[in-house]
Image (cartoon, rainbow, N blue to C red):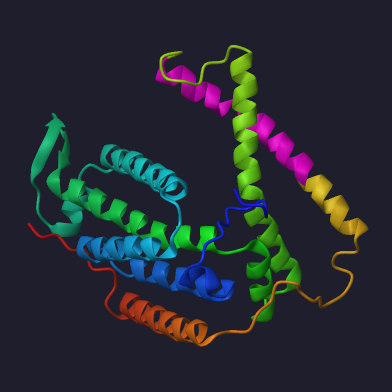
Amino acid sequence: MSKSGSLYIERQSVFHRLDGSIKLLMLIAWTFFAFAFLDARVFLAMIALGLVLLRISKLPAKAVWPLLLFIFIFTLFNSAFLLLITPEFGSKLTGTYTRAVGIGFYAITYETIFYCITLSLKYISIMPITILFLFTTHPSNFASSLSRIGVPYRVAYSVSIALRYIPDVKAEVENIINAQEARGVAFKKGDAGIGTRLKNYATVMVPLLLSSFNRIEVVSNAMDLRGFGKNKKRTWYHRKKYTKLDISLAIVSFVVLALSIAIKVVVGAVYWYPF
């Protein structure tokens, strides 16, 4: 966590020098492009390019890889859930049926397994650009950028606050878990079974919500005392002019966004199955 209380990590890279609104536009274009396809080859290429961009950003691996690992594990659970609920959905997309495993009438097909892999790759392909946006964008810079492109400053400041308080929520979760462990509640592997541990993690939500509501009230009162929202416009301490690089990447992002929408409308997300 940076001194700003956000996920922002100070580095000297091309992405840190970009305006926050440009990085948001890149994120939107990248996401639209990913959802315009249902092709594992496209997603693998996007993942490779995303990893190269992360390398260029000079972000520390210890900050990036835990988030990537979490998303990877989440997509595995999501794929397993899809396999259990819709074991033959992939066969409906391809028109072929190749039984992989099953008991009686219940069977999981190879087509569905490949579909789940493709879907997981889609989610993973969006992560690198999301990480770049979160870890290279200072909340104040991003809020002022949103305000400059026409977003009401109340909305822009709300986004800034949300970015700032992500690490605080994470720290609050750790504090609650430590307090619960001091009372003998099991959260670690070996202390209890997985069912008990999942149930114990669920109990963290109530104190987390209560502390979050209390934090919202404190911040809201502080902003009211300072007259936030009284005027229609406001000035920003963090604001800089668009550079040639900002304009160039904005043009590229608009082209990618338009191309993605055109592909989605005209062609649709065609599912690629190589077998």
Q: Is residue 257 left or right of residue 44?
A: right
Nearer to me, 107 or 18 = 18
Question: Which stretch is magenta?
Answer: 193-215
Say which residue appears at 41% left-offset and 83% top-offset. Answer: 252
Task: Report which quarter residue 150 is drawn in.
Answer: bottom right
Residue 198 in the image: state x and y as whole percent: 48, 25
Q: What is the quadrant of the C terminus in the image?
A: bottom left
Residue 211 in the image: state x and y as whole percent: 73, 36
Task: Report which quarter residue 175 is drawn in.
Answer: top right
Residue 35 in the image: state x and y as whole percent: 36, 66
Residue 156 in the image: state x and y as whole percent: 69, 68
Say which residue appears at 9% left-offset and 49% top-offset. Answer: 97
Nearer to me, 255 or 7 = 7
- For residue 205: magenta? yes
Magenta span: chief secondary structure: helix
Q: How many marks?
A: 0
